[in-house]
Image (cartoon, grey):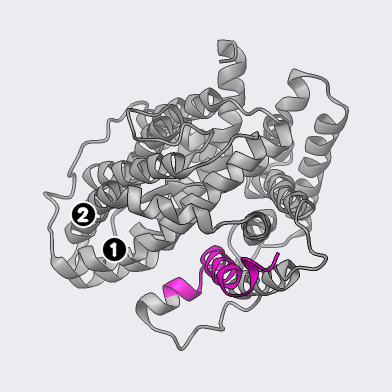
Amino acid sequence: MLPMGMLFAFGLQHALVMYAGTVAVPLVFAAAMHLSGPQTVMLINCGLMTSGIATIIQSVGVWKIGSRLPIVQGSSFAMLASMLLIGQIYGVRSVFGAVIGAGLAMVVLAPVMARLMRFFPPVVIGCLIIIIGLTLIPVAGRWIGGGTPGAPEFGSVANLVLAFVTIVITVGVQAWGRGFWSNISVLVGLVAGSVIAALCGMGHYGMVIDAPWFAVSTPFAFGLPEFHAMPVFIMLLSMVIIVAETTGNCLAIGRVVDLPVNDVTIAGALRADGLSTMLGGAFNSFPYNAFTQNTGLIAMTDIRSRFVVAAAGVVMIGLGLFPKLGALIAALPAPVLGGCGLVMFGMTTVGGIRELLHVRFEGTRNGLIAAVSLGLGLLPMACPDLFTHMNGLARLLLGNGVLLCILSGVALNLLVGQGRN
């Protein structure tokens, strides 16, 4: 437990890093479902508040719920396609009903799912961390370009220069700053980059003026959820991705903070996912899983306290209750976020490389396991149209590089690795 000032300064960094990913899912969902402006703002506020609560549950822990690791919780992109499919056929209220049902199933089945962790040897863990980092690099790239590929200003010289300056400031503070300043290098980069953008006329803060000061998210704002067997079944199948990602992220964070991760830890993390997902469905939000974005920040700053992450949860709740604060963070220029994101996601990738340095390749088939799992994990990012002819759940599963890396690594380890290392 750090002093209160440092606790929330470090926590603010985590909140800023996870903010963009947290609001992206409700934004995309609202646009696809043709929701009104006020409904969209409500979804964002609900997402921020429940994400903060979910992060506190995951990091602090309640009884057998929570990993008690410095893990943040955010809305899962992996579930977006299933939610849109359900929403277009059954309606918005059925989406929230399916979310609640899938979350309940996750809480009940968590101990069974947790036993899967024994199939994750170091070679699989190392490849997984690398894929997590590399999969996030395109996200940073889109931010660097301006946020929306195809927009007139995307990739402009001004955006690229702003991102480059942000990277230089972040790296400089991290490399030559001392103590506290080195640890908040990402926050310094975000603030400095935003100030430079504002001085150059690149900031747009009109939304801050228009946003209300205070708003409380209310449950079931769209009406009572509707429960249909098929939507709940589709959502539950899609939760396989959340199980894989949360298991992988727990193992990755465990390696970064040098703490053992066992079946009990994984079960607690999955219960937290399930409880948070149920909470999300009740408060007009979506399924939650352990976010990957913040792994690089922990590796970069070496601040391993789970109470720092819990403080980030408090900040997220505040952003959800005070829309003006959320609007201020939302006004951060995308190139600034991209510059900091590039550094952090790169650090995540380096963490996986360091893990592979401890794997014995001579006289084993670990090289084969790493080659295939890395290759398959990179496919959805390297060739996004590869699975165009796949439909429904198959396309959803095959389009997730993290899941492909996990499944192929575990399968190859069972077939050619165990007993032959």
- Residue type at mark 2? Gly
Q: Which residue is at the front of the view, 69 or 158? A: 69
Residue 404 lies in magenta, yes or no? yes
Q: Secondary structure at mark 1?
A: helix
Q: Which residue is at the front of the view, 279 or 130? A: 130
User: Vertically, is 120 above or below 292?
Assistant: below
Q: Quadrant of the C terminus?
A: bottom right
Q: Which residue is at the front of the view, 200 or 181? A: 181
Report the residue at 56% width, 57% height from top.
120
- Mark 1 and 2 residues: CB-CB less than 8 Å, in contact? yes
* Res. 26 in view: no
Q: Whole-percent x and y of residue 32?
A: 35, 65
Q: Quadrant of the N terminus?
A: top right
**Separation (CA) of disc 1 from disc 2:** 8 Å
Q: Which residue is mark 1?
A: 235
- The image quadrant that residue 366 belongs to is bottom right
Range covered by the magenta-colored residues: 396-421
- Residue type at mark 1? Met
Q: Earlier in the sequence, mark 1 or mark 2?
A: 2
User: Vertically, is 178 above or below 345?
Assistant: above
Report the residue at 47% width, 31% height from top.
68
Report the residue at 26% width, 54% height from top.
99
Q: Which mark is residue 101?
A: 2
* Res. 108 in view: yes
Q: Which residue is at the front of the view, 213 or 10? A: 10
In the image: residue 400, left or right of residue 241: right
In the image: residue 358, left or right of residue 201: right
